[in-house]
Amino acid sequence: MNNIKANRLKDQIFKVWGIACTLLGLVLLAIFIGSILIDGLQRIDWDFITSLPSRKAERAGIYTALMGSVWVLVLTTIIALPLGIAAAIYLEEYAKKGRLASLLEVNISNLAGVPSIIYGLLGLEIFVRVLEMGSSVLAGSFTLALLILPIVIVSTREAIKAVPQSVRDGSFALGASKWQTVARQLLPASFGGILTGVILALSRAVGETAPLIVIGALAYVPFAPESPMDEFSVLPIQIFNWISRPKHGFEVNAAAAIIILLLITFLMNGIAVYFRNKWQKKLG
Amino acid sequence: MRKFKEVLIEKTLLTSALITILVTLGIILVLSIEAFNFFREVSIVDFLTDTQWTPLFTEKHFGIMPLLSGTLLTSFIAIVFAVPVGLTISIYISEYAPKSFRKTIKPALELLAAVPTVVYGFFALTVVTPFLQSFIPGLSGFNSLSAGLVMGIMIIPFISSLSEDALHAVPNSLREAAYGMGSTKLQNAFRVLVPAASSGIIVSIILAISRAIGETMIVAIAAGQQPRLTMDPTVPVETITAYIVQVSLGDVEHGSLEYRTIFAAGITLFIFTFLLNTLSYRIRKKFREKYE
């Protein structure tokens, strides 16, 4: 009898430990967000968002970095989206089981695990030097596009895979060709899932710092980019730059900019989760 | 005509897929060529055995060991912290938690993984380090302990979510058999489910290690920029990734030896993560066969 009691006690203890661990990360996140809000919220006003960078902490703003982030985000989407979706369609609907298909599969799984800073080295050599784009918005966007490509491919494949086989059979039975089936049935049916994956991938791109530092994006850019060939900064790099300065005023700026960055990433994640839930209901 | 169009489309799609292979080849080529140029000037024996890394000083040493030890130390701290916590979370969510709790907690944990790493770096530097300093008096302002712990927080969701998937995939008959023998949930979890899901759990841990080794911003901000061969978690160190950032921020001329050091460091990093990723892929393939 004693043994049973001891086991039940252990079971209960583990349950409490489990709740504690599960909440640990969230509690830490809450502490962190709380402390950042206390530090940075007072600093956020319209001026902070529309001001150019400055050597004086009180006058510096995030305008150029924010515009840089928007530019990079748009161009990255334009590059990565068609490429990733096309590759996913090929792997899911066209590729025959064989050497090539499994090579592509291993390769994509490997690319997903390559550290982001390595993509920076790739971008530095190929886009900045060999293709002579310089440290431009375009070079940064290509680098980030390659970085998120595996994520886009994997999530698009899952979305297409989730469309029931009967949809394909029905389309073929009506005499549709393979591409007609893909374009008119599968893509519309998996749209919600693809959208979710793409938004999550882009939210990752928005927070990336290291690869853009490596390709030479600057912390101090006096003007917002006006063309894809302009120099640029992005929000995370601006934050990193402010963190590495000793004066307290810049730490406050960093906290304020972090609030804006977190707002953007959480918003994107929220939208992604919303689409996922809506889409899953439709499928089920 | 229609046939021609179909073939053309298929070829276009295939080309897109092949670009991913081009990316891998590009990475390998770029790293190897620049690293090759580096090793024409620096002997590979020095690179592997010298205990100092000072390419930016007048007296130059090119020993990768200090950077490697910094990388491994911060990753080790992160893993030691994240594995027990992440595993416990996965067991709790998959076996103990009520369904409704699980539905809300999973997206919340995903949020931890969505926070940009530069933000975690700020957290480590301005919150965690001062907090740790209040009871570890000798702790330096930049240290691997704080960076490692925060990196651990970042990788918890990787471990918990992948391990939970693995536990979830264990057939219910095994659970029922264990309960039928009178075991508690705890006994069931550790004696039946964890061993049954072990390959999936190992994969999650390997991927987490690979993630920690390649992580850049947290360590660049909070662990410092002083390459030193040490296992002391309270002093500043420099990781491979932080070194690449440090050089990229400065004015280093293209084609110089300093420029090439970041590729030599990069290829070292790439080899480590490549081996870990390949290993995890192999295990995952095997694991799939087991239950299908």
Image: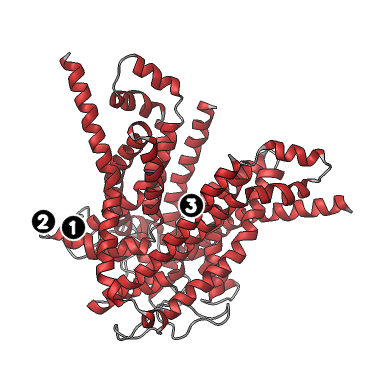
Q: Is A142 rendered above or below residue A194?
A: below
SS under mark 2: loop
What residue is shown with label 1? B234
Q: Kindly identify the amino acid type of the residue bearing the numbered disc 3.
A: Val
CA separation in Å, label 1 and label 3: 40 Å
CA separation in Å, label 3 and label 2: 41 Å
**Image spot of residue A204 (x, y percent):** 46, 59
To the question of a shared chain for discs 1 and 3, the answer is no
In primary-sequence order, the first of circles 1 and 2 is 2
Q: Is A35 rendered above or below residue B78?
A: below
Examine the rendering and report whether any part of residue B147 can be seen.
no
For residue A185, side relative to residue A255 (left or right): right
**Image spot of residue A171 (x, y percent):** 77, 42
Image quarter in which the C terminus of chain A is found: top right
Q: Chain of mark 2?
A: B
What residue is shown with label 2? B135
For residue A138, side relative to residue A222 (left or right): right
SS under mark 1: loop
Contact between labelled residues 2 and 1, with CB atoms less than 8 Å apart: no
- For residue A273, the mark is 3
Mark 1 closeness class: few <14, some 14–19, many ≥20 residues within 10 Å: some
SS under mark 3: helix
Q: Kindly identify the amino acid type of the residue bearing the numbered disc 1.
A: Thr
Image quarter in which the N terminus of chain A is found: top left
Task: Residue at 81%, 51% (x, y): give it.
Answer: B6
Q: A105 and B28: which one is in front? A: A105
Task: Residue at 57%, 79% (x, y): give it.
Answer: A229
Task: Residue at 75%, 46% (x, y): give it.
Answer: A181
Q: Quadrant of residue B174?
A: top left
Q: Chain of mark 1?
A: B
**Image spot of residue A51 (x, y percent):** 40, 84
